[in-house]
Image: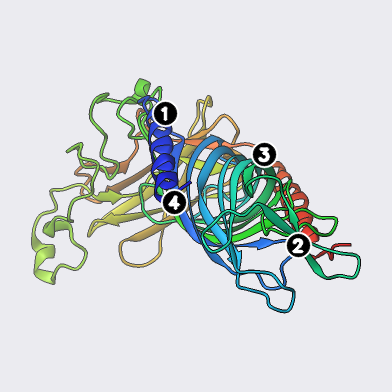
Amino acid sequence: MKKKNIQFGLFLVILIFSNVVLGGGEQTNFAFGLKVGLNRIEGDLNSPLFKPFTYGTIRYNLFEYLAIGFESGYSVSGSNEDEKRGLPEFQSTIVPYEGQVIFSFLPLHKINPYVVLGGGGFYWEYTEKGQIPHHYYMPDSSGNIAQHDYGKNMKGYDSFFKSGGGVEILLNRNNNLYFDLGFTFRYSLTDMLDGIFDGDENDGLLDIYGGLTYYFRGSTRGDRDNDGVPDELDLKLEIKEDPDGFMDHDGKPEAIPPSINTSGSDSDSLIADTEPPVVIHAPIHRVEAGRDINIKADIYEKKLKTTSLIYRPIGFDGWKVGTLRSRGGSSFEGIIPKRFVKKQGLEYCVIAVDEATNGVGYCGLPKLPVRVEVLSHPKTWRIISGAAALIGWGGSGYLILRKQK
């Protein structure tokens, strides 16, 4: 099998599969990724080489802490000639096709550690000087390497188990582009990847990688324009709301008008205040249960009278009122206590009023609040992720460090 044919075939499979799973406009949790790195055989070799690989991935988040995925790619591994043992230079081509489960520790953070467990099949091909031999190598009773007839070409299909982990790092404000950095260990059910049949363990494959993952976040049911405002509260179902309080519906904050810029001169204070405060706040849409919510906003107004943070659990009638405290300049901050962060969700508003009472600056109003989804049982899922890491990484470490008999 030629390298170009393998790569082209994999590209077609990934492209077709991504079109199938991403075709629906209601999907928000599918992702496509590409990663590159170095891998080497963990088997019967004294000094295996790290060689390059490329994998493509498809991922679907069942929910924030758990995802499933499919991965395939193309890798080469091998070793230089070992004159002392009488082993030739060789190269093994490996094409995996595998399923996996991904456990996330901190899915709402910019840096999210994760654990991977999975398995699948792979195609392998062993070559010496570019040719596929019909033989393999095996030590005799005295420890000398002897050549044995394999009976057919040194290639075929087999299976493996894998474990791994890493971190994904958020790269943009849309929460859909991540940089991945991690490692994987695959333990195969064959001992022929390095051409040597020896010991009581099969061959494995260890890799380190970096890559990018892109999430196709489309509209969700109940939020037609995907602006974070549920349809039953949205004044413009087909147009995204502008979360900074301006009613231009473009979803982007504008420059601060000169007449309310806090850096104006003394002469500006003589001009009558005819505009309401400007509130710029990035709405929070998802949080974990059992934690305070830190609310930050920039508020622009020369003669500010009051700044308020009002909030309540979804389904409750009364609003709780808190104060946004100044952190210097236009920066303000407030806290929603964790006792109000209930599993049914939360809604809140950021409101500012000036002394001239020209109007209200806001992000969210009681009739159109910012709604927050609350993720339940975060500690339980971190314990589950930790157990997955202990099982997967512990088993991999044992197989890598253990000396074969």
Question: Closer to us: mark 1 or mark 4?
Answer: 4
Reading the image, the residue beneath label 2 is 400
Colour scheme used in the picture?
rainbow
Nearest to N terminus: mark 4 or mark 2: 4
What separation in Å lies between label 4 and label 2 (alpha carbons)? 29 Å
Q: Residue, x 48% and y 44% (percent of image)? A: 57
What separation in Å lies between label 3 and label 4 (alpha carbons)? 47 Å
Reading the image, the residue beneath label 1 is 27
Reading the image, the residue beneath label 4 is 3
Nearest to N terminus: mark 1 or mark 4: 4
Between residues 400 and 81, which one lies in front from this camera angle? Answer: 81
Q: Amino acid at mark 2?
A: Ile
Task: Find residue 140 and report its horizontal and vertical position in percent.
Answer: 86, 64
Question: Closer to us: mark 1 or mark 2?
Answer: 2
Between residues 127 and 42, which one lies in front from this camera angle? Answer: 127
Residue 299 lies, with reference to residue 358, above or below; the image says below
Nearest to N terminus: mark 2 or mark 3: 3
Q: Is residue 179 visible?
A: no
State left or right for residue 77 relative to residue 212: right
Question: Closer to us: mark 2 or mark 3?
Answer: 2
Q: Is residue 38 visible?
A: yes
Per the rendering, the mark at residue 377 is: 3
Question: Closer to us: mark 1 or mark 3?
Answer: 1
Q: How many marks?
A: 4
Question: Closer to us: mark 4 or mark 2?
Answer: 4
Instruction: Name the outermost residue toward the bottom.
Output: 84
